[in-house]
Image (cartoon, rainbow, N blue to C red):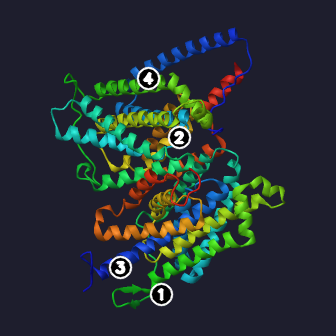
Amino acid sequence: MTSLQIKTGAARLQPQVVLERQQAATRRKRWFYLALFAVALVAPMAIYPVFLMKLLCFALFACAFNLLLGYAGLLSFGHAAFLATGGYVTGFLLSHYSGLGTELGILAGTLTSAVLGLLFGLLAIRRQGIYFAMITLALAQLVFFIYVQAPFTGGENGLHGVPRGQLFGLFDLNNNLTLYYFVLAVFVFGYAVIQRTIHSPYGQVLKAIRENEPRAISLGYNVDAHKLLAFVISAALTGLAGSTKTVVFQLASLTDAHWHMSGEVILMTLLGGVGTVLGPLVGATVVVTLQSYLSNGPLGEWVHVILGLIFVICVLLFRVGIVGWVLKLSRRNF
Amino acid sequence: MTLIFGIPLSVMSGQLLLGLINGAFYALLSLGLAIIFGLLRIINFAHGAQYMLGAFAAVMGLNYLGVNYWMALVLAPLLVGVVGVLIERFLLRRIAGEDHLYGLLLTFGLALILEGSFVKLFGVSGSSYPMPEQLKGGYNLGFMFLPTYRAWVIVAALAVCLVTWFMIERTRLGSYLRAGTENPKLMQAFGINVPLLITLTYGYGAALAAFAGVLAAPIYSVTPTMGANLLIVVFAVVVIGGMGSIMGAIVTGLAMGLIEGLTKVFYPEAANTVVFLVMVLVLLVRPAGLFGKEA
């Protein structure tokens, strides 16, 4: 697993210099996040809020996926199942129980995805590498077929007109702007969870497993339990993204469960930069923007071909991704 | 009328036959995947697209060039095999030293490109391929009606599987292939052209998929997405069988087809999902797969 990791330029420096550089980097990072958050706050004044919300949902999806691929080194080809499960559970509950607060609907969707993630994880971590990818893909296809036939998903039609409802019984989410700030809060929460996970001692162990699994085992870590927890966190946050997306579009459909969706999230992460913190965010922005731009233009029917081409180009020439590339450039210059 | 578990024998044997045919396709495709995986260590996600290419090559050959079924059975695999050789030589080789997951992602991208272009050019509904004259009709076996073409599919698929098995397990070329699977560097030191062997292996795997595609053309409708959905089932078959042995891939493929056929008789709702459920069971009981070597 040597090539999926991002090489940090660890030259031998004095500890003092290293510390100063780290502090400077932390300060820069803090300002960057503040600026980004400020932009997110005013963005709906300039850009259509529904598009921004779609972007945030997919960004959270990609960030959750990257937690697994980038930090645990596990390539899941079945994340569409979690996205769809969150969406269907939330959509079903909000449509059938009108008194239910939207936040509870989303919570239920997230928890169901987490449970599904636990089941997937228990099976898939029994094998490694390529088999792991194939097993997750097959399990997701199993879930897809169940959703095609199950009575509560609306089959081919999906669930339409899901009410957005009220947040904590206080805020009316039918207002796009109110909903936008809610979705932004959900995203920031999900992002914070991922950040916390990555920078915790647990996250360090995950990275150690990615780098050298036999060594992590010999050091006494329960590798399977660590992988399983990462899988469950990733599935839960993916479910959160799916639930939120259902509230935004008032729709839950089979598109989310299809394996194309699992492929798309891989593409977002790969394009943005695997194992970088901001990569999935950038990748999701590029892919979602590209898709909505293409679908309105003359190239609308070529979307899959273009996505496929980006895939091939990324793998052949651009494995570090956009953020990885920027990091490389900045390291060279500073 | 004879009944088995309350099911008429003719219904039962009819579904088993259909299952066996599906199984023959699973066997052909998982065999190709296993061979490619053995030497290249990548999962060929474009396998479904290559199967689809084979079927479309047969349809287009007939419509535009008047190539008949028997010619198509030879020419389509050759054509797709050459495409496979080009893919290996100019794309896959460039990432040979990288993580094996990149091979999966690259071939996934290729599958998206191929399927997307065919959807654009031919639409999602696709076209049909006429049954060849010589294989029309069928035999009445007393307890069931056996259409000639379906019998032919099983015989042809099994013959190709067995020839492939023979080539790999019993010939000099096959011994190079097996040795290359074990230790490519040592093989190269002995003066065997391993890169060429790898290229030919990928081409052969792609040709096998295309052969399955031509066989499928007269009985399944030829659509751009025909391969993608089949491929995911084949992945499950590969997980069940494990990619350790050639014979294992063939046997598992046929068995899964039969199980699918039986499910159609007794509980049709689960026919789509039964192979995945078997995969779950196998993962619980024997994670390495039925014929797998590694854990």
User: Considering the image in quadrants, where does the N terminus of chain B appear?
Assistant: bottom left
Q: CA distance from mark 4 to mark 1?
A: 64 Å
Q: Rate crowding at label 3 as few (under 14), some (14 to 19) or many (20 or more) other CA atoms within 10 Å.
A: some
Q: Amino acid at mark 2?
A: Leu
Where residue B200 is drawn, which disc sits there? none
Q: Rate crowding at label 1 as few (under 14), some (14 to 19) or many (20 or more) other CA atoms within 10 Å.
A: few
Q: Residue at x 53, y 71 (%)?
A: B212
Chain holding disc 1:
B
Residue under label 1, please give it: B135
Residue under label 2, please give it: A74
Chain holding disc 2:
A
Residue under label 4, please give it: A192
Residue under label 3, please give it: B14
User: Foreground residue, A292 or A66?
Assistant: A66
- Asked which quadrant contains residue A23, the reply is top right
Q: CA distance from mark 3 to mark 4?
A: 57 Å
